[in-house]
């Protein structure tokens, strides 16, 4: 594609996708606010988090095999239609705001199934439209779009749930899906046909190859292990941020929005620092350091006096920065250590292995938070994460990562897959 027609096509597609992401983030945060204020239960938020993560984690690894063979444009349109139908159904169920909570869990699970197809499909269209030399720039633009929607979405969601019923707010999701579909209908996305037969044995072989590539290097295996342990302790607690804001810091809808925006601002700042500064520190040192900093942030969130809301918001920004830097450093290490033709299955394997145990962690965290208190659950998860970071520095095989190769690769690459792991939305 030597002409500039791809620019118009890509801008048209992502204009619709941006609006869809914005409305989706707004609705998702509105649901969190509604659940937090309506039920005031850590267990309810935990089960809502499980419903939103488990289906995508289970089928996410295998979905990519199908998306590589199906028409991406049709996958995106059908996914948007499915998500719009989910929003419409939830709106009907919540028209009196008295729906059985189990129905809400079911609909959140179905939304997760739709996102399992939509998220990887939208990530695969860039190589089909954009010249190779422009892919890095497009990746950076996409990161900015995600960050902006992560910042603006909660603010819009808070404003909407303040003046509208939850059933009415859900129509924003339907509107966003319609706009995204329209933006896809009028563009051409190339479809690459493949003659490779799809079978159970083929899917299992992909999994096996991914495991072999990670286990072949002990340092890399330790990197995965420690990162998954951090996710296991951090993600379930991170979902409790709205309750920490309302129950411990005595906040309301707007305070919850401020904390959500603070997290997204931190993510954006972390990415900006890595993109602008030429950091020469070894990536593995940055990963281990961010484990400690992330743990310290959670520890402080539960340790500060309940009247220090501003301090709580600042610490939340710090947590977002540490997660952003960790994600970029982790991604760069994997890109340098794993062959390019194996990256997709290795990242998808990591996502499933990290999220599935975290779902189990959510069950315990919800019950534990009910017994020991929300702030104490932050203290506990933060302390354990700090300990993992310290142990990481004391692992010789882990610290050897990168010594045998030049530490190349730009640190401004921030992996969307690794960042959703702790997306509270």
Image (spheres, helix red, strand yellow):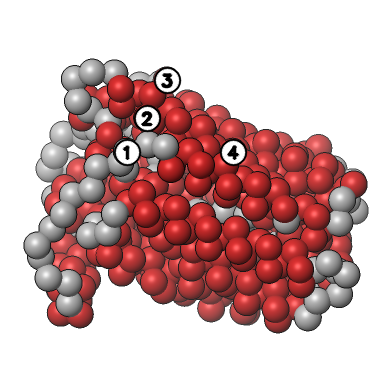
Q: Which residue is mark 2?
A: 9
The kind of secondary structure element at disc 1 is: loop
Q: Earlier in the sequence, mark 2 or mark 3?
A: 2
Q: Earlier in the sequence, mark 3 or mark 4?
A: 4
Q: Are marks 1 and 4 in contact (CB under 8 Å)?
A: no
**Which quadrant of the view contains residue 100?**
bottom right
User: Distance of mark 3 from mark 4, alpha carbons?
Assistant: 28 Å
Residue 107 x, y percent position in the rendering: 63, 71
**Foreground residue among 138 and 235:** 138
Check disc 1: other Cα within 10 Å, few if <14, some if 14-19, many if 20+: few
Q: Which residue is mark 1?
A: 188
Residue pointed to by mark 4: 19
Q: Is residue 167 visible?
A: yes
Can you tell which of label 2 and label 1 is closer to the viewer?
1
Quadrant of residue 261 in the image? top right
CA gap, disc 1 to disc 3?
35 Å
Q: Secondary structure at mark 2?
A: helix
Mark 1 or mark 3, whichever is nearer to me: 1
Quadrant position of the C terminus in the picture: bottom right
Residues at marks 2 and 4 touching, judged by CB atoms closer than 8 Å = no
């Amino acid at each position: 594609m030597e002409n500039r027609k791809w620019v118009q096509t890509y801008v048209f597609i992502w204009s619709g996708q941006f609006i869809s992401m914005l409305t989706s983030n707004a609705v998702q945060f509105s649901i969190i606010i509604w659940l937090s204020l309506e039920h005031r239960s850590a267990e309810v938020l935990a089960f809502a988090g499980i419903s939103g993560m488990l289906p995508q984690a289970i089928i996410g690894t295998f979905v990519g095999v199908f998306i590589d063979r199906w028409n991406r444009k049709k996958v995106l349109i059908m996914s948007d239609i499915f998500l719009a139908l989910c929003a419409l159904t939830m709106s009907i169920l919540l028209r009196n705001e008295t729906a059985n909570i189990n129905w809400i869990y079911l609909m959140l699970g179905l939304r997760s199934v739709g996102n399992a197809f939509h998220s990887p499909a939208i990530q695969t269209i860039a190589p089909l439209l954009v010249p190779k030399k422009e892919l890095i720039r497009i990746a950076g633009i996409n990161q900015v779009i995600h960050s902006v929607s992560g910042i603006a979405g909660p603010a819009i969601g808070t404003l909407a749930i303040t003046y509208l019923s939850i059933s009415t707010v859900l129509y924003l999701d339907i509107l966003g899906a319609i706009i995204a579909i329209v933006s896809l209908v009028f563009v051409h996305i190339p479809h690459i046909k493949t003659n490779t037969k799809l079978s159970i044995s083929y899917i299992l072989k992909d999994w096996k190859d991914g495991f072999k590539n990670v286990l072949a290097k002990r340092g890399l295996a330790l990197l995965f292990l420690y990162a998954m342990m951090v996710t296991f302790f951090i993600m379930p607690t991170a979902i409790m941020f709205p309750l920490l804001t309302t129950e411990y810091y005595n906040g309301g809808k707007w305070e919850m929005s401020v904390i959500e925006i603070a997290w997204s601002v931190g993510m954006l700042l972390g990415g900006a620092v890595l993109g602008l500064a030429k950091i020469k520190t070894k990536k593995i040192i940055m990963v281990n350091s961010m484990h400690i900093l992330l743990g310290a942030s959670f520890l402080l969130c539960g340790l500060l006096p309940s009247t220090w809301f501003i301090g709580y918001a600042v610490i939340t920004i710090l947590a977002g920065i540490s997660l952003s830097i960790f994600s970029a450093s982790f991604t760069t290490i994997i890109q340098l250590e794993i062959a390019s033709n194996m990256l997709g299955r290795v990242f998808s394997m990591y996502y499933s292995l990290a999220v599935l145990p975290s779902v189990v962690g959510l069950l315990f965290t919800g019950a534990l938070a009910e017994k020991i208190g929300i702030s104490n659950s932050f203290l506990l998860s933060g302390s354990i994460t700090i300990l993992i970071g310290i142990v990481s520095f004391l692992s010789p095989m882990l610290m050897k990562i990168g010594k045998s190769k030049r530490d190349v690769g730009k640190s401004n690459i921030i992996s969307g897959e690794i960042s959703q792991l702790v997306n509270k939305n």
